[in-house]
Each structure stands twice: as C-alpha cells, then as structure tokens.
Image (cartoon, rainbow, N blue to C red):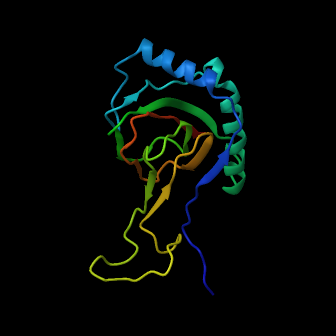
Amino acid sequence: MFNSIFSSYLNIDFFNIDLKEIKKEIFKLKKDDPKGKIITNNGGWQSQSYREIKKPLEKLFNKINKSILTVQEKLNLNNNLTLTNYWININYLGSFNKPHHHDKSMVSGVYYINTPKKSGNIIFTQPYTVFPTEKNIDIKQHNEYNSDYWTVKPEKNKCILFPSYLQHYVESNLNKEERISISYNYEF
C-alpha cells in the first residue's frame, strides 16, 4: 500500500478585487516611509510590519480570512487562526527575496497586486534532498514525491497560503515594471 506521509500544502485562491484603492494605499505607505526595511529583500522596498488592517485592505483581508478557514479545516484545527501581521513588497527590476521561512507563525501567505511578465516566481524548497545528488535520476514528470522545489507563478489577484515553516524565495524581477505583493502571517 502506497501512503503519503508528512505532506505539506499550498492553498491557492483567486479574488476578484478592484486593486486601485489598495495600490493607492501602498504608494502612500511607501511615500511616508521611503526607506522601508530590509529583511529578506535584496533591492526593492519592503514596508514595516502592520497589525491593524488599513481601511483600503479590509475587503482583501476578509477574503483571505475565508481562505484561512479552508486551511484550518484541512488541518483539522480546533483553534482559530488570526492575522498577526502583514507587510508590503515592491520588487523593482533586479530585486529578489532571499530564501527564508516565517518561524513565529503557523500559516503564511502572499497576495499579488501587480505581476508583470518575468517579475519573479515564488519557489518553495524541500527541507531535504529527495534523491542522492550523485545519482543521475531521470524523472518522467515532477510531482510532490520527487521534486526538490515547487514553483508558483505570480498572478494578479492570486492568494497563496502555506505552512510558515516552508522555506521559500522569490526570483529576480526581470521586468522594468514593479511586482507588488502583500505578505502576511497567521497564528493562534
């Protein structure tokens, strides 16, 4: 009998949200704090961490909270997950985010606001090597059992939720137009 053990997850939803007011709020926050902060971003701009949801983002976080309920149900959790913090990411040409994980939460995520072509995928990596590196393994098709990494293409209005322990990074933006996203963490 073939069993799956120690599985991980990605929950992906698309929201139909008018992003005009959200973008306006993001550029206001950037204007108020042009330096931002540097954590995993190499180039680009990352906002401070916020706990209180700003008014233009309320509709978005109401939808994210519904997606969080799906994850909560799939994980069979009795406790309710709640938003602990969020921040804004703007990646300009050549900007990227280094490998990292979110060690003080249960569920993390990203919501894409502006995603020009070749603006950088998010890559999730296995915490271990699937096959010995010295072996030349010929794989017919990659899947969750034989992959060392999983690539997700950013798309406008895409919401991704994943376990906070999952290591990930964002490839360089190869487009002159900026990629804009909001990242967030949830816990009990």
Pick the front one: 135 or 74? 135
- Residue 77 against residue 83 in the figure, above or below: below
Q: Residue furthest top?
A: 32
Q: Residue at x 45, y 56 (%)?
A: 124
* Snapshot quadrant of residue 44: top left
Residue 52, x across and y down, in percent: 59, 21
Pick the front one: 62 or 173? 173
- Residue 133 against residue 183 in the figure, above or below: below
Q: Residue at x 71, y 32 (%)?
A: 62
Image quadrant containing the C terminus: top right
In this rendering, position of residue 84 left or right of residue 127: right
Q: Residue at x 29, y 76 (%)?
A: 133
Pick the front one: 126 or 31? 31
Q: Residue furthest bottom?
A: 1
Q: Residue at x 71, y 37 (%)?
A: 16
Residue 15, x across and y down, in percent: 69, 40
In this rendering, position of residue 10 left or right of residue 80: left
Pick the front one: 78 or 117? 117
Residue 127, x across and y down, in percent: 40, 62
